[in-house]
Image: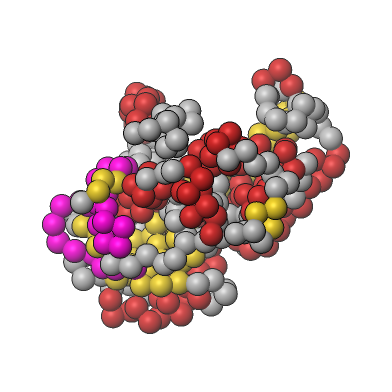
C-alpha cells in the first residue's frame, strides 16, 4: 500500500485493538449479570446494539449509550453547535430500535472546558430537535466543567457529548435477528451522509492530504465542506416503530454505523447476506475515496456508503416495508436477500465479501 492511500488504522483508529480490549472489558461486564438474577436481570448477551433488563415477566427496559465522537471537532472548527445534539440522540435511539424497543427518553452528559451560554444553548437546540424526530424526552443530564481533561480544536470551546437512551419492549418480542431465514428481503433506508462514524479518517483525508478546511467550498458538494460534514445523522425511529406496531414480520433491524454493512453479521441467525445492489452513495463518499486513495474495502468497512439503516423481513412484506420506510420522506431500496451458507456479507456490485468486521476483494 503506498503512502498516498489512507486507511482508518493510519489515521489513528485501531479497530482490531479495540475489539481485543473490549473482550477483556466485556468479560468483567458480563460477570455483573449474575448480580441481578431476577428483577433487573440482563436478557441479552453483549454484542447487540442495546440490551434489555427484565422488569417482570413480560416488560423489558431497553438501554443503549453512545457519543458523537470526533465529529465534534468539525463543530468546533465551524464554531457551530446546533446539530451535534441531533447526532447524539440519533446514535442512541437508532441503536435502541434495533432490538425492537420503542425509545422513551435519553439522558445527556456534556463535558466542557468553559460553560459558554451559546454553546450550551445550541447543543440544547439540537437535542430538542432530535427529541421531536424520535418522539422522546430528555428528563435530565449532567454538565461537567473539566477543562484539564478536554482537548479539542478550539480552546475554551472544546467539549464532549454522550447520551444514554431508554425504551420499552415486550420481552417476547425482542428482535435479535435469530428469525432471519433464507429468502428474506433486505431493505435499506438512506443515510444523510457520513453520519457520526469515520471522522478521524475523513479529517485526515480532507485536511491533511487534500489541504482543505471546513470553510472550503467544494463544487461536488455544492456547499462548504464543514456544512457537509456537520449534516446530522438520520433518525429512523418513526419508520421502525411504525413497522413494528403494524405487526409486519420484521426479523432483523440494523443500524449501519462503523463496519458498514458487516453490521448485518450482528444478527444472530446462521445465514449469509447477499447484497445484489447498493444505491449510488452521496457525493461526499466518492470525494473521500478519490482524495484519500481509499480502497473500496476500506470505504465499506468505515462508512455507511449511503445506507443508514437496514430492515430484514419476510419477502412477502416487501412492498409494505418499503411503504413504511418511505413514509417520512426518506429514500429506501431493496438491497438483496438472506441466503443459506456461511455468515458472510456479499457486496456484488463492489466485488467484496465481508467476514467479521472486514471486507475483502472476492
Residue 345 as seen in the image, left or right of residue 140: left
> In the rendered image, which quarter is residue 137 located in?
bottom right
Asked whether 59 or 26 is in front, the reply is 26
Q: Is 24 a magenta residue?
A: no
Picture residue at 26% right of the left edge, 56% below the top: 351
Q: Is residue 326 visible?
A: yes
Start-end of magenta stretch: 335-358
Taking the view exactly as shown, the residue that stands out farthest to the left is 341
Q: Position of residue 343 (x, y in %)?
A: 20, 51
* Image quarter (top left, top right, bottom left or bottom right) of the N terminus: top left
Q: Position of residue 193 (x, y in %)?
A: 55, 56
Asked whether 239 or 136 is in front, the reply is 239
Q: Position of residue 218 (x, y in %)?
A: 65, 54
Picture residue at 76% right of the left edge, 45% below the top: 80
Q: Is 348 a magenta residue?
A: yes
Picture residue at 19% right of the left edge, 64% below the top: 339
Tell how many labels: 0
> In the rendered image, which quarter is residue 322 located in?
bottom left
Q: Is residue 50 visible?
A: no
Taking the view exactly as shown, the residue that stands out farthest to the top is 148
Residue 337 as seen in the image, left or right of residue 93: left
Residue 358 as seen in the image, left or right of residue 305: left
Can you say whether 23 is above or below 279 in the image? Answer: above
Can you say whether 167 is above or below 319 in the image? Answer: above
Can you say whether 199 is above or below 9 in the image? Answer: below
Q: Position of residue 262 (x, y in %)?
A: 33, 50
Can you say whether 329 is above or below 260 in the image? Answer: below
Asked whether 290 or 282 is in front, the reply is 290
Picture residue at 84% right of the left edge, 35% below the top: 116
Taking the view exactly as shown, the residue that stands out farthest to the right is 117
Asked whether 175 or 162 is in front, the reply is 162
Amino acid at each position: 500500500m503506498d503512502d498516498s492511500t489512507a486507511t482508518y488504522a493510519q489515521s489513528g483508529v485501531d479497530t482490531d485493538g479495540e475489539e481485543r480490549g473490549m473482550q477483556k472489558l466485556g468479560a468483567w461486564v458480563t460477570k455483573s449479570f449474575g448480580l441481578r438474577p431476577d428483577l433487573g436481570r440482563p436478557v441479552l448477551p453483549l454484542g447487540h446494539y442495546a440490551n434489555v433488563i427484565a422488569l417482570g415477566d413480560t416488560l423489558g427496559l431497553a438501554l443503549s449509550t453512545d457519543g458523537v465522537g470526533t465529529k465534534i471537532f468539525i463543530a468546533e472548527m465551524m464554531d457551530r453547535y446546533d446539530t451535534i445534539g441531533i447526532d447524539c440522540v440519533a446514535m442512541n435511539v437508532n441503536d435502541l430500535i434495533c432490538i425492537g424497543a420503542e425509545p422513551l427518553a435519553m439522558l445527556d452528559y456534556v463535558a466542557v472546558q468553559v460553560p459558554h451560554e451559546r454553546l450550551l444553548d445550541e447543543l440544547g437546540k439540537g437535542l430538542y430537535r432530535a427529541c421531536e424526530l424520535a418522539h422522546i424526552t430528555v428528563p435530565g443530564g449532567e454538565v461537567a466543567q473539566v477543562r484539564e481533561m478536554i482537548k479539542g480544536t478550539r480552546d475554551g470551546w472544546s467539549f464532549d457529548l454522550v447520551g444514554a437512551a431508554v425504551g420499552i419492549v415486550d420481552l417476547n418480542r425482542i428482535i435479535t435477528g435469530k428469525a432471519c431465514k433464507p429468502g428474506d428481503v433486505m431493505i435499506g433506508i438512506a443515510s444523510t451522509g457520513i453520519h457520526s462514524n469515520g471522522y478521524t479518517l475523513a479529517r485526515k483525508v480532507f485536511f491533511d492530504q487534500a489541504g482543505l478546511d471546513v470553510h472550503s467550498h467544494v463544487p461536488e458538494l455544492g456547499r462548504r465542506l464543514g456544512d457537509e460534514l456537520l449534516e446530522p445523522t438520520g433518525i429512523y425511529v418513526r419508520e421502525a416503530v411504525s413497522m413494528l406496531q403494524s405487526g409486519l414480520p420484521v426479523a432483523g433491524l440494523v443500524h449501519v454505523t462503523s463496519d458498514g454493512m458487516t453490521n448485518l453479521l450482528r444478527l444472530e441467525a446462521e445465514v449469509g447476506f447477499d447484497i445484489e445492489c447498493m444505491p449510488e452513495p452521496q457525493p461526499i463518499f466518492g470525494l473521500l475515496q478519490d482524495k484519500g486513495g481509499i480502497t473500496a474495502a476500506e470505504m465499506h468497512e468505515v462508512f455507511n456508503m449511503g445506507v443508514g439503516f437496514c430492515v430484514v423481513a419476510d419477502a412477502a412484506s416487501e412492498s409494505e416495508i418499503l411503504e413504511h420506510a418511505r413514509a417520512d420522506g426518506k429514500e429506501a431500496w431493496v438491497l438483496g436477500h438472506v441466503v443459506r451458507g456461511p455468515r458472510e456479507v456479499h457486496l456484488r456490485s463492489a466485488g467484496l465479501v465481508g467476514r467479521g468486521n472486514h471486507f475483502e476483494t472476492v
